[in-house]
Image: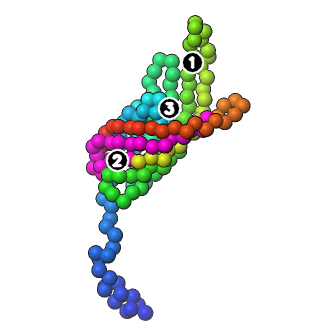
Amino acid sequence: MLVVLVLIASIVPTEALPPKVPRLTAADAAYVEALGAGLLLSLNYDRRLDEQYGIRIGGIPGSRSYWVFAQGYMLSGGTRSHHLELGAGLGVMVWQLNLFGYSSDPSPIVYVPFNIGYRVQPADGGFLFRIGFTPSLFFGRNRTTLLPWGGLSIGWSW
């Protein structure tokens, strides 16, 4: 039986095996995202932990509003530069309302952003482009709200 397996393995041509996808060497990326998990406009940094998983942190610097979120995602795809992103995270949004001289106390809102998207990023770094569907679940005092949303990002990876 062992002899038969060895003979079969030696007959199968190596060309029939699927080619390996090139290893991703650009582990870091910085980008600006319009809409998306930051809801309006956000600055983001992400780091690949391995070929499939990574972490992301981003926020909006501002005087009266501030968003902070972290998001893990999975990348998969059959080419060097094109990837599918799937992910979820946790966000905290704090804002203070100033209207007609009235100022409210800062109110934190916790939300969970999801991501189903397409990412173009060369394996060895360079221009980065992302587009995706980014719905978010907002948890309020008395109710939970789902916001269907989308986002677009451009940046650089290295």
Amino acid type shown at disc 3: Leu
Above or below residue 6? Residue 37 is: above
Above or below residue 134? Residue 16 is: below
Q: Circle 2 sits on which residue?
A: 120
Q: Please tell me whether residue 26 belongs to the stretch shown in magenta.
A: no
- N-term-proximal mark, 1 vs 2: 1
Name the one closer to the observer, 40 or 51.
Answer: 40
The magenta-colored residue range is 119-138
Classify residue 90 by image quadrant.
Answer: top right
Q: Are marks 1 and 2 in contact (CB under 8 Å)?
A: no
- N-term-proximal mark, 3 vs 1: 3
Residue neighbourhood size for the residue with mark 1, other residues' Cα within 10 Å, grouped as few (<14), some (14–19), many (≥20) = some
The label nearer to you, 3 versus 1, is 3
Classify residue 6 by image quadrant.
Answer: bottom left
Q: Circle 3 sits on which residue?
A: 39
Residue 92 visible within the image: yes
Q: Is residue 11 left or right of residue 96?
A: left
Q: Which residue does the image show at 31% across and 39% down from the upper left?
A: 156
Q: How far apart are labels 1 and 2 at the CA level?
A: 36 Å
- N-term-proximal mark, 3 vs 2: 3
Q: Which residue does the image show at 43% across and 93% down from the upper left?
A: 1
The single residue placed furthest to the top in the displayed view is 101
The spot of residue 83 in percent (x, y) is 39, 52
The label nearer to you, 1 versus 2, is 2
Q: Circle 1 sits on which residue?
A: 96
Amino acid type shown at disc 2: Val
The spot of residue 68 in percent (x, y) is 50, 31
Look at the image and tell me in which quarter the C terminus lies.
Answer: top left
The spot of residue 78 in percent (x, y) is 36, 59
Q: Which residue does the image show at 64% across and 35% down from the upper left?
A: 145
